[in-house]
Amino acid sequence: MIIGSKIILRDKRLADAQDDYTWQTDPALAQLDAAPLLATTFSQYLADYVSELRYASPTRYRFAIETLDGQHIGNCTYYGINEANGEAELGIMIGNRDYWDKGYGADAIATLLSHIFRRTNLKRIYLKTLDLNHRAQKCFQKCGFTPYGHLNKDGFSFVLMELHRKQWERWQWKRDDTNWTKEH
């Protein structure tokens, strides 16, 4: 469990399946994620979900995002971990719209970055976000990410963003003195 100021990052569990299925079958959320709308039944989804929990990938770490009072509001992950290049890709989704624009996403990202840079040897975290998703871009920039390019893929236009360990270390010094994240 990794504790931030507003959220807790914890391992995914079977009880998250219903929320995840609901979010992945929501057309608006799928569009923001540039993902196809999930078109399987919950039973099929659940079988795949159980398998994914049981046989976790060594190049992907998934976390549920919970409020401090235990409400599951989204998920984040770092994946495509390349130890040789010292980099990985980051992804996040706050699926519960009641928690949008209230700092939960930024806290989840900052908490995950703190975990990654303190617990791994990774030197660069990168991501892509839809060109039109200015809210996400603002959140990522608040967490220290900088744009470095564009990508057109599968009919979508993305902004590419990155954060290097050295940038993160400088960013940590610039933040106010509050202890934004604690790891347990």
Image (cartoon, rainbow, N blue to C red):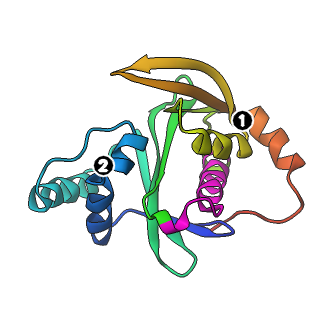
Residue type, label 1: Arg
Side of 60 relative to 6 (left or right): left
**Is residue 60 rendered magenta in the image?**
no
Side of 58 relative to 174 (left or right): left
Q: Main secondary structure of the magenta part?
A: helix
For label 1, the residue is 165
**Is residue 105 rendered magenta in the image?**
yes
Secondary structure state at the residue bearing disc 1: helix
Residue at (59%, 52%) from the top-left corner? 112
Instruction: Tell me which numbered mark, 1 or 2, is placed earlier along the sequence.
Output: 2
Residue 26 against residue 91 in the figure, above or below: below
Residue type, label 2: Pro
State how many labels appear: 2
Res 125 quadrant in image: top right
Q: Give the camera-side residue of 36 and 132.
A: 132
Residue at (46%, 66%) from the top-left corner? 73
Q: Quadrant of the C terminus?
A: bottom right
For label 2, the residue is 27
Side of 136 relative to 97 (left or right): right
Residue at (62%, 53%) from the top-left corner? 115
- Residue 32 in the image: state x and y as whole percent: 43, 43
Res 181 quadrant in image: bottom right
Quick check: can you spot residue 82?
Answer: yes
- Residue 54 in the image: state x and y as whole percent: 24, 57
Query: Magenta part of the protein: which range?
Result: 98-117
